Amino acid sequence: MKVEFYYDSTVQPGATFNTDNAKAVELVNQLAAKGVNAKAVDLKGAQVAFMTYNASLTGPKAQVRAVFGAKGALQEDFGKTVPALLVFEKDADRYPTEAFPRSDRDLQRTLGCEEALQRILEKA
């Protein structure tokens, strides 16, 4: 498994998909300490590469796809006003199997990055 969390320390996350970046980074570090290939990527004002953004849209199945591409979470928001979490089944996979934040049908609400990281940590 590989986990990548994208955020920007120079931008405050938006209210719609609010994330506590410091807490999310700590959860990523806990995953890494457990041996999971996990990293937090601070964009520091730069825009995420189109390939990464595109993978978050096209890789996961529709039911586990992130809010990106939808109104309110476009490429310029990825990792900035909308911190993003990509989960890959294998370390070498090009496309994630899950992306967050996303609408969860079972929970009937948005599943954010922090909660998703906590769930992954509990299973690791």
Image: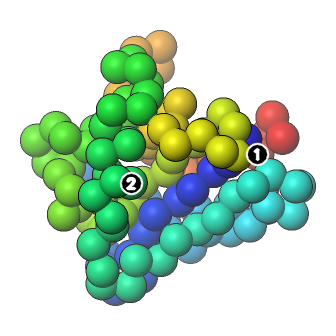
Q: Residues within 10 Å of mark 1 (few under 14, many from 20)?
A: some
Question: On the image, numbered disc 1 is attached to which residue?
Answer: 121
Q: Nearer the viewer, residue 88 or 25?
A: 88
Residue type, label 1: Leu
**Of labels 1 and 2, the one closer to you:** 2
Q: Would you say residue 63 is visible in this rendering?
A: yes
Q: Position of residue 104 (x, y in %)?
A: 42, 23
Q: Position of residue 85 (x, y in %)?
A: 49, 50
Q: Nearer the viewer, residue 108 or 4?
A: 4
Q: Residues within 10 Å of mark 2 (few under 14, many from 20)?
A: some
Residue 84 falls in image quadrant: bottom left
In the image, what residue occupies the spot 44% across and 42% down?
100
As drawn, the label of residue 52 is 2
Residue 102 horizontal side relative to residue 30, left or right: left
Measure the alpha-carbon separation of dots 1 and 2: 23 Å
Residue 93 horizontal side relative to residue 35, left or right: left
Residue 75 versus residue 55 in the image, above or below: below
Secondary structure beneath dot 2 equals helix
Q: Position of residue 113 (x, y in %)?
A: 50, 49
As drawn, the label of residue 21 is none
Q: Would you say residue 119 is visible in this rendering?
A: no
Secondary structure beneath dot 1 equals helix
Q: Are marks 1 and 2 in contact (CB under 8 Å)?
A: no
The quadrant the C terminus occupies is top right
In the image, what residue occupies the spot 30% across and 80% down?
46
Residue 9 horizontal side relative to residue 29, left or right: left
Q: Position of residue 116 (x, y in %)?
A: 58, 41
